[in-house]
Image: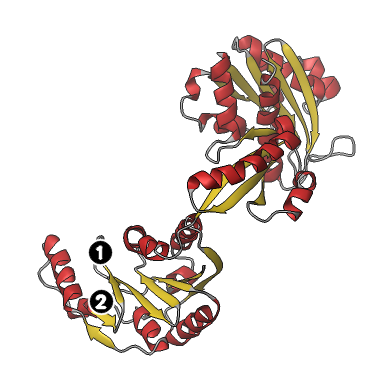
Amino acid sequence: MVAELISVGTELLMGNIVNTNAAYLSKKLASIGVSVYYQSTVGDNKERLKKTIETAISRADVIILSGGLGPTADDLTKETAAEVLGRDMYLDERSMERIRKYFEALHRTNITENNWKQAMIPENAIILDNNNGTAPGIIMEEKGKSVILLPGPPNELQLMFEESVIPYLQKDNYKVLYSKMVKVCGIGESKAETIVKDLMEAQTNPTIAPYAKTGEVHFRITALAQSVKEGKELVKPVVCKLKQRFGDAVYTTKEEVTLEDKVVKMLKKRGLTMVTAESCTGGMLSSKLINVSGVSEVFKAGLVTYANKAKRELLGVRKKTLKKYGAVSKETAEEMVLGAAERYNADVAVSVTGIAGPEGGTEEKPVGLVYIGCYVCGELAVYECHFTGTRKKIRETTVVTALNLVRKMLLDF
């Protein structure tokens, strides 16, 4: 079964509101095995809306329109869809009564005349009760196609979709899409895809879809099945193959788990404490860690030592080291990480110093050069990294890389 989504409202086209309905509907439809091939957004214009609906009917089994069911003159969805399908409109008494009761519950007795527009229903339509608002939803069936009209407010649309639309769609098409995520860090996008190229070329069901993130690659493995249990069985061997191929570059198979979640969990499990010392990332690394609930059990301090004076005073970096090798150097990163661990009596420490640009680079030390120091329970390693992109991207990639280097060192403890 193929669905097409049409979001109606000039305010969406102008960017006045974010179209969360399309994302919600796509995700929910996928979960019951309904494929979405196209999404459209159209303003409050009858002719353009009419053409959009006609196009959708020509290529989809289910057309879902959201928005434009309200009481005002620019709410045209219902009337336009009825015209496309050749349906007359009638005033539905049950819908009128539900609207009246809704306003009475709000202690509003002076109902304006235009509100009854919402009780006008195309003939031979299925009416969907709105338990969070006034405008009823509508389903019109025509020559094997279903045109479903839903209100625009998300709290109304979501409840109606859950209560009425999902059962309607599932009566003849009960399938589920089961997904599992494999998150990989420390391997570039092109290399990661090369590693699984043969699997992707041979895929049928389940499928593998790569998603590039800053410093990471996520693979979503999705199976179309008759049940969640069957979906798990289909996905499981593919997940195992990816874990075998990527080894310890895989840090989780849970969609909700982030890299910082993983690091904090590893610290807690091992009973270790951590401190950070940052220069070019300016606190971004510690901020990532602090995003994790319960991190206070393991995270002692985050130091931003941007100036050389701060590196000397807060971390004990020697003046001669800075003079001889510079702030961006292996030697400075080493003294930063050791100083942080010693001064805060931490089991784990990370230091970052680099050139994020766009100015400040030289032939010897170009923009994107970053040194990351990692100290874990007496073991020390300093990594030289070369990143590309904007200042923001270089800093973000540095943070992800630093977290991943700590994670990999913790695997041995």
| Of residues 104 and 373, the one drawn nearer to the viewer in this rendering | 104
In primary-sequence order, the first of circles 1 and 2 is: 2
- How is the protein colored in the picture? secondary structure
Residue 44 point in image, percent of width and height: 42, 79
Q: Which residue is mark 1?
A: 133
> In the figure, is residue 241 to the left or right of 253?
right
Q: Which residue is mark 2?
A: 118
Real-space Cα distance between discs 1 and 2?
11 Å
In this view, which residue lies farthest toward the right? 363
Residue 143 point in image, percent of width and height: 44, 83
| Of residues 185 and 145, the one drawn nearer to the viewer in this rendering | 145
Compared with residue 249, is residue 209 higher up or lower down, i.e. above or below?
below
* Residue drawn at the location 48% of the way across and 57% of the way down: 175
* Residue drawn at the location 35% of the way across and 63% of the way down: 153
At mark 2, the secondary structure is helix
| Of residues 387 and 153, the one drawn nearer to the viewer in this rendering | 153
* Residue drawn at the location 42% of the way across and 73% of the way down: 9
Is any part of residue 312 visible from this angle? no
Mark 2, other Cα within 10 Å: few <14 / some 14–19 / many ≥20: many
**Which corner quadrant of the image does residue 285 belong to?**
top right
Residue 370 point in image, percent of width and height: 77, 33
**Which corner quadrant of the image does residue 87 belong to?**
bottom left
Mark 1, other Cα within 10 Å: few <14 / some 14–19 / many ≥20: some
Q: Quadrant of the C terminus?
A: top right
